Image (cartoon, rainbow, N blue to C red):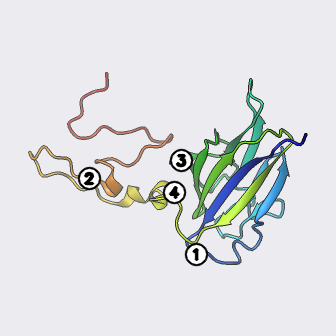
Amino acid sequence: MERRLTVLQVSLHHPSLCPAAFANVPPRLQHDTSRLLVGRGRDAHLRLQLPHLSRRHLSLEPYLEKGRALLAFCLKCLSRKGRVWVNGLRLSYLEQVPLSPVTRVCFSGVQMVVRVEEGTSLTAFVCCFHLSPSPLICRAEAEETDEWEGLPQEQPAPGSGEQAPGHLGFPHSPPHTRDSPPQPGPGAGPEI
């Protein structure tokens, strides 16, 4: 009896939608259980021709969780200079996170959404790639760049007791990542 392959439905969007950038994207790619490389290098399984993309930018890595009989996947950042954001969290070089049933990824201006459809095969998986003309992730630029650092934050009028929203709806502080812990708002007491 043949076992059903796990399918990763991968949607891709880039604002330029340059046909040359996505010329090497296959509609379907069956892969063994080694890591699947994403980048602009010749050895990348998903090759994107974008100027700020590393030759090996990130990888999708299948693994078997202890006590489970299904493949699981993690996403690993392989770029020393390029940034990779997964579900709003920035990954540094060689950091990895497990994929959830739906995972949102931003890198080099690319928005990627990965949906995992579990199968029973432990020897291979399939990626189905879809190019989207529309953005896939709201506020991707806010997550993918540090543009908030150079922008002034609105401050409430003295004594008003109200908090004015900061850049992109964050109250008085930039979004926190693993690199920067959350900052308390004005008037916040010490943490207990």
What is the secondary structure assignment of the residue under circle 2? loop
* Discs 4, 1 touching: Cβ within 8 Å: no
Q: Position of residue 76 (x, y in %)?
A: 68, 45
Upstream in the sequence, badge 1 or badge 2?
1
Q: Which mark is residue 103?
A: none
Q: Position of residue 2 (x, y in %)?
A: 89, 43
Residue 6 is situated, as x and y percent measured from the top left of the image, at 76, 45
Q: CA distance from mark 1 to mark 2?
A: 31 Å
- First in residue order: circle 4 vs circle 1: 1
What residue is drawn where x is 74% and y is 28%? 68
Label 2 CA crowd tier, 10 Å (few <14, some 14–19, many 20+):
some
At numbered mark 4, what does the secondary structure look like: helix, strand or loop?
helix
Residue situated furthest right in the rendering:
1
Residue annotated with mark 1: 16
Q: CA distance from mark 3 to mark 4?
A: 11 Å
Q: Which mark is residue 144?
A: 4
Determine which of the numbered discs, if any, sits on residue 87 in the image.
3
